[in-house]
Amino acid sequence: MSAIDIKSFAADGLSRRQSLMVHIQPVNPFNDEEDHRAKTLKSTEIWNESPALSKKPENVRIGNLQTWRAVKEYKKALFWASFVALSGIMWGYDVLIGAGLLSTPKFRQDFGYEYQGAWVLQAKWQIAFNTASSVGGFVGCIAMGYLADHFGRRLALAAACCVSCAAIFAQVFANQNGVLLLGKLINGVSLGSYLTISSSYAAEVCPVELRGISTSGVNLFMGIGELLANGVIKACGTRTDRYAYRLPFACQWVIPVIILCGIHWCPESPVWLVRQNRNDDAIDALARLGYRDIANTLSMIQEANEHEQDDAAQKPASYSDCFRGTDRRRTEIAMGTFAVSQLTGCVFIIGYSTYFFELAGLSNDNAFSLGLGVGAIGIVGNIFSWLLINSVGRRPTILWGACGLCIMNLVVGILDVVPSNGTGNAWGQSICIILFNCIYFLSVGPIAWALYAEISSSRLRSRTIGLGIVVQNLFGILLPTVIPYMINPDEANLKGKVGFVFAFTTAASVVWVFFRVPETAGRSFDELDAMFAAHIPTRRFKDHRA
């Protein structure tokens, strides 16, 4: 058991680190099962002694009032988690900027060819540009699992920003398709890194009351990025010079530059510092994050780290560990929640919203403007999800949200089959798209980010999160490639009938969520470790006393 001795010094001018002296005594390994139970009990007691992190054992659900109090008390931790999550804007921006520029005449002229009096971009280049970031993201999220654990979250994020700035330079001044593709591919490496770091950092610096809000905030910033991309394309797309596409690419520089300017003052993750045996630095980081009871909070982090190190027999963490023992179940949940968010058909329903608005009779400009409005509604929905993420819980929100999305997909498909003389069916599909967007950003979208960031063990968090991003990148390659073949008139020509396909995949996702996704709201990382180690059934997580 670690002994923490806090000594205060009265002399003025001493730094916070000097005023907190921490002596860590060697920890004896577990000799038998009784020692292990005693250590687990003591860790739970330390957790409950921490005022900001305590909770009633018979009911782990956290009310909105308690959440609001935590926001006020830990506003510094929430601020820095949000600062790192700014990088999520880059992912959302890149997703929309690639597809949006295909509608820009000057972009097609410079990177395409003339066909029957019009400038077009070859299909192979369309697919390449739209999937390059996801391919690069594969490399980024896997590599960042190693880099973030070895060099820390701050340094890894700074490196990703530097790589991104160089890749954006290639995109802005590209005059050949290959150069632009290379720029997007390299930038994709940074994008995958951004999502890995921002999620793990948010989960590690915020208390349990704010963990769901901070991790789901990554999804909020992604939505903001998509909205900004649409606005920039609308403003620049009608230009007749190269700045029609250079300006949208150049706008990507803003976020990495902001992060690089502020990263010096950003506290390092105290969880990572403890894992590096840098306990003095962890004390300083906790103080800068606004924690008051630093001794108990540090002790809790140390206890969780010691448990994981003992279970892992002091072996270095690797990706193969994510699929061993109790971590296999946790990795399945982390990867599965991302698969669920994609299998709901969000890429089809949200990505092709303008298409359905035009079918409803709206002009191209009005359809695009309404698409911007739908994006804004999604951001508002993400914010309102914070009222549900603690009070209702992760499991009910994602389960019932997926049910609602299944219904919306089904209605979109039915309206495409039912005969109609006018535009009534198209308007019905448009309404379903708006409702789909509200439900998705209120439930499945943000909850998936909260679950996959907190479900993993501290030792494997960066790697498990990286595997979750791999799933997202896989669908980011697959769906944009397949959906055009499903809806194009010269291919399958399914149009709105694609809703039937995603209604089926969403229904399958509902079944998986019901049997596999546990309730994690209000649980400390140490409690989650103990519950997974005890093989608690999924539906008993909510009421289990750890």
Image: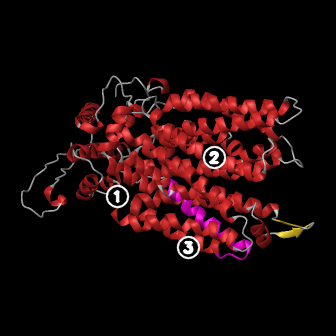
Residue 268's label in the rendered image is 1
Q: Which x, y percent locates residue 301? A: 30, 45
- Above or below, 89 against 546 in this view is below
Question: Is residue 237 a member of the stretch shown in magenta?
Answer: no
Q: Is residue 100 visible?
A: yes
- Under circle 2, the secondary element is helix
Gap between marks 2 and 3 measured at Cα: 33 Å
Q: Amino acid at mark 2?
A: Gly
Q: Which residues are magenta?
A: 173-195
Label 2: how many residues lie within 10 Å, few (<14), some (14-19) or many (20+)? Answer: some
Q: Quadrant of residue 156?
A: bottom left
Q: Amino acid at mark 3?
A: Ala
Which of marks 2 and 1 precedes in the sequence?
1
Gap between marks 1 and 2 measured at Cα: 37 Å
Q: Are marks 1 and 2 in contact (CB under 8 Å)?
A: no
Question: Is residue 179 a member of the stretch shown in magenta?
Answer: yes
Majority secondary structure of magenta residues: helix
State the residue position of label 2.
373
**Residue at figure coordinates x 77%, y 52% from the top left:** 364
Q: Which x, y percent locates residue 328? A: 50, 40
Q: Which x, y percent locates residue 386? A: 46, 38
Gap between marks 1 and 3 measured at Cα: 25 Å
- Under circle 1, the secondary element is loop
